[in-house]
Amino acid sequence: MKISKITNEEKARAFATMKKPEVMEKQKLPVRYHVEDYDPTDRPRRFLEAFAAILKHSNYRFALDHYIRISAKCSRCATQCQVLLATGDSHDVPCYRSELLLSVYRRHFTMAGLIRGRLTNDAGLTDEKISEMAESFYNCTACRRCVNECPAGIDHGLITHLARYILSEIGIAPRALVVSVREQLEGKTGNTSAIPVPALIDTLDFLEEDMKQEKGVDIKFPRDVVDCDYIFFPAVSDYLMEAESLMGIAAVFAATNDSWTIGTGYYDGINYGLFYSDRMLERIVKKVDRETRRLRAKNILIGECGHASRSAKYFIPTYCGGENAPPVLNIIEYTYRALQDGRIRLNPDVIVDRVAYHDPCNIARQSWIIEQPREILKSFCKNYVEMTPNRENNICCGGGGGTVSIDEIRPYRTLVGGKAKAEQIKAAGCRYLVAPCANCKKQLRELVEDQGIDCEVVGLHDLIYKAIVFD
Amino acid sequence: MESLLDFAGGPLFRLTFALMVLGLLRIFVLDLWGMFEAYRKAGDKKFPWSQTIRRTIVWLLPVKKIPNSRPFYSIISILFHLGMIIVPIFLYAHVHLWKNSLGVGWITLPQKTADTLTLMVMALGLALLLGRFFDKNAAFISRKQDFLWPVLILIPFITGYVCSNVALPPKTYRYFMLAHVLSAESIFVLIPFTKIAHMVLLPFSQFVSQLAWRFPPETDEAVCSTLGKKGAPV
């Protein structure tokens, strides 16, 4: 994949900061994203303490040991990173980024590093390096495309994940993510978009009326029904921004007649813990598990959201009982099965414009959900086209790893992170770009707007809603 | 000189070879133990065995991966690795030495093939070194050992080739042979402590990266407690 580098003028815009210089100086943090006030004194010592505590109670240590022994610095990853391809700056080589943290581990947590440090009078981790990590690990979108091309099998996404976790323990994390998680875990509404239950009920009632008018049948959003087959957790922002996706999902259930419900005790699939803190990740999936058990639902169904799906699929078993944890599936899997079983009918004459599919990294990279959405789309879209590269090797939308929620870095996301994706979309020439992920949708809409691309970004179930037929 | 060569080819060879084997065994066992421990502690025991085994096989002979990234470099690298592994193990002169000392021998390469492969390794090694110097990103991320390894690897190949193909005066021959043996022994000693450890660790890589995402349960409270953050707000 070859893309043109950004121009100097674009670079200036992408890397401009809206932060006040006095704030950056006070926080000792020359990064573009806002960070809540924290104690910037003695950062190296506190970083190492946090690193040690995390290593003590986690499984990261053996992987770091393996990575420092095996890393061959071949730079094959350099051709994969959409950020590096846009900036051309070697500081964005995934292996360089990972080395920022691996060098700290090698120096402070291995015998050889400690001895070498003593012999060479190397003071070790510095404030400057912490600032560099704070910048670098949030320039990465944690899309893990580089992982598939690393001959040594180093998971640079895992290292970004861990580095952000350690940084967050000393107070360095994007304010946008922290504020959302605080509302989700400690706020009155208990969800990241701060939607109170009455507002949720109003929205659902309103959508039901809309569907009755548009489709002429009663399509429901069941609430707090016990003993259902499925309990539904979309990215909660969908209730504000993705009405058509939600209506499409409700329409599929109306057609299949399976039992499903939304729990008013907790209804948010978003888990920003995946992006900056394992501790938050654990607390958030436990909320999903608690609501599932409260309503005695058999399966957890995640809406159109990549990171929400990955958080639930991989971490509900981790934190909520292993084999005894409730099974997790993504709505695309459910709809695909319904289509295969002939339980839903989609009119092939409704969507005649060109349609392309964007693979969200969090469901595609590990070959989890790849062909199902394609099969669904091909079944009723006459003019379906592929963007290349795709599937496990897809290009990130540019807003991955939680960066899409950081509004102050939008120019960076749409000029740098999303540049490769923008060129891909232009080449596809599609009218509809299907992106079954709340984060991707937001980023891609901003991307097509900022890059002047004439294309509508929609969810998979938005199109299904348009095409679904009831007897 | 004669006795130095005898010493290098005898006791020193045995020592350095043993250090390499033991060093590799150590990291092999540590890696394996790390994986077992991680799996034991993981909250989610489901593991994508077939996918991980498939990925491991693909990366052990990464022909399928050539077109994806830096294809020219990838082809050079694969051929370099093949030559570097095949020649020292199957060279007639080496097998003959093993047979004399251990009484065990195995199939050998025809001399002409071995010479061709040796020349190939030399040319490709040089190409890789130049690639590292002149590729902006590769040069930027390289450490000292990344530049030194191709040089160190080339020494035994060059000296070995000269010894078996050039009519040298006996004294010069012995110097070359000494350089050949000592450089190979330096490689043996350094292997377990440097990136060349991948010769035994590579089969584990895909398993390590899969397992590393399988976290232990209940770490929130434990980390909070260690950091004195119990009950602290988000």
Image (spheres, coloured by chain):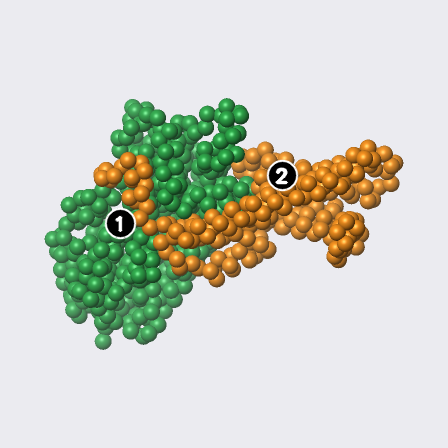
Label 1 sits on what residue type? Ile
Residue B216 lies left or right of residue A257; in this view the side is right
Say which of marks 1 and 2 sits in front. 2
Point 83% across, 37% down: residue: B173
Residue B190's label in the rendered image is 2
Identify the secondary structure beneath mark 1: helix
Task: Establish if A219 lies above or below A114.
Answer: below
Task: Establish if B195 lies above or below B206.
Answer: above
x, y percent for residue B221: 28, 44
Identify the secondary structure beneath mark 2: helix
Q: Which chain is green?
A: A
Q: Callout 1: residue from which chain?
A: A
> Which tint is chain B?
orange
x, y percent for residue A274: 33, 47
Q: Callout 2: residue from which chain?
A: B
Q: In this rendering, does residue B221 appear at all? A: yes
State the residue in front, A88 or B41.
Answer: B41
